Image (tube, rainbow, N blue to C red):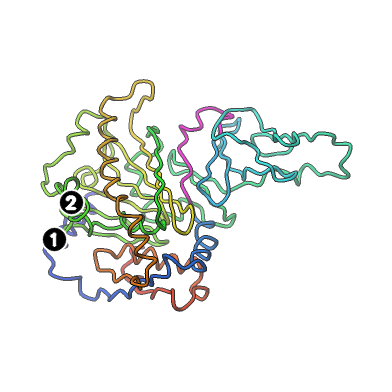
Amino acid sequence: MDQAATLHAKQQMAFERDRTGPPEGFPKLADIPGARYVDPEFLALERERMWRRAWLYAGHTDQLPNPGSWFLTRELSSPILVVRDLSGTVRAFYNTCQHRGAPIVTEMSGESRGFVCGYHGWSYTLEGKLTAVRDRRDFVDLDFSCRSLVSVRCELLGNLIFVNEDADAEALLDHLGPMRDELAQYALDELRFVEARSYDVECNVKVLLDAFLEVYHLKSIHQRTVDRFLDHRGMFVTLWPNGHSRMVTPNSRPDWKDPGTIGMPKIPTVTEIPADNNVSYHIYPNFVMPPSDSGIPILQFWPTSDKSCRVVSSWIAPDYDPADPSPLWETRIKNWERILYEDLQFAPQIQESLESRGFRGMPLNYQERRIYHWHEELDRRIGLNQVPPETRVEQVLQPWVEA
């Protein structure tokens, strides 16, 4: 953020802290229909029209340290193979042999100079080109050029690898819009991969994702942790195009610093607001990043069924040496995990309640408008005329989106 943006952020926090109601002209938000969380037909639309056409974080380039390094991601609707080719380019393919559909790789990661399908021995380059088949003499007019592995769109945000099953999707950096320039301060192309952990939870993916789009729950769920140092009443939100958003929550004491980060290497280009407050970015649909100047956690929320999800928590940081990590990391991640478990604790019970006849819809307030923004974008991606009227949300927040 430049000086003007920093001043504007401070003014916004002061305005939010002192207001006595929503800003003039802010619309009444219609209830989010409960069926959007439990109805199989709607969830199928969501899966096909949104999840399979979205830019989704797959991993970090440190997970591909050498030419020939590869890893498999199973979080998407189909297993996808991400590989660094001999020229250093990061590529992605469906993990599907073009002979009879067997998996190209069966391990989660590895390193090789090419791929050989374990079923019938068809061979491919790291660029996905078919180079050899067993008993080629028995195939009539087999055109190798038409039998390459099927590629998946793969683009980088710094060292962060994103994939998209939609071949016609807008370029990732263009898709991010105004967020792209603001993220430059975090030097994402210089940060190292620290670790990733996953947590399987018995609830619809939106139940947990919603919790990370607002701070309305702090005083109930996080009384012993983040509520002690964050001022939720001073929080302000920025809504961006394509469903993306940002949330800035001031520290209760302007001079407060996380004691667990003192002495850790810093990202020198991080500006005042994210260095001294809690900022959280959301890249639609499932990427949440609350950065600090000494390390950045990344949360992803993946549907594993209509009633279950997986949360993946990853960390990236400046000057991280996996061979000699700072002893502070163990405590830092443990503290982060404690906060995360506070958010996960009630999710299965919430899911049970959502499935009851007592749940009809969600009346959201001004603080929770990022959730409404998320649902508006979902309907746009499905197609407004394709969403059944009883599950559709009214499009009212466009005047509040900053282009």
Q: Please, what is the three-letter code of the amino acid marked with disc 1?
A: Arg
Q: Measure how far apart labels 2 and 1 are at the Cα level.
A: 10 Å
| Quadrant including the C terminus | bottom left
69 part of magenta stretch:
yes
Circle 2 packing at 10 Å, graded few (<14), some (14-19), many (20+), is many
* Position in image of residue 280 (x %, y %): 29, 50
Tag on residue 312? none
* Position in image of residue 195 (x %, y %): 39, 34
The answer to which of 169 and 115 lies nearer the viewer is 115
Relative placement, left or right, of 261 versus 177 is left
Tag on residue 17? 1
Say above or below: 290 vs 373: above
Residue for badge 2: 250
* Position in image of residue 305 (x %, y %): 49, 55
Q: Are marks 2 and 1 in contact (CB under 8 Å)?
A: yes
Relative placement, left or right, of 245 versus 61 is left
Q: Residue furthest top?
A: 324
Circle 1 packing at 10 Å, graded few (<14), some (14-19), many (20+), is some
Residue at 40%, 61% in the rendered image:
243
Secondary structure of the residue carrying tag 1 is: helix
Q: Give the residues in magenta.
A: 56-70
Say above or below: 359 vs 111: below
User: How many callouts does the rendering have?
Assistant: 2
Residue at 27%, 64% in the rendered image:
368
Q: Please, what is the three-letter code of the amino acid marked with disc 2?
A: Pro
Secondary structure of the residue carrying tag 2 is: strand
Say above or below: 298 vs 330: below
Q: Residue furthest bottom?
A: 389
Residue 84, by quadrant, is top right
Q: First in sequence, mark 2 or 1: give its number.
A: 1
The answer to which of 38 and 311 lies nearer the viewer is 38
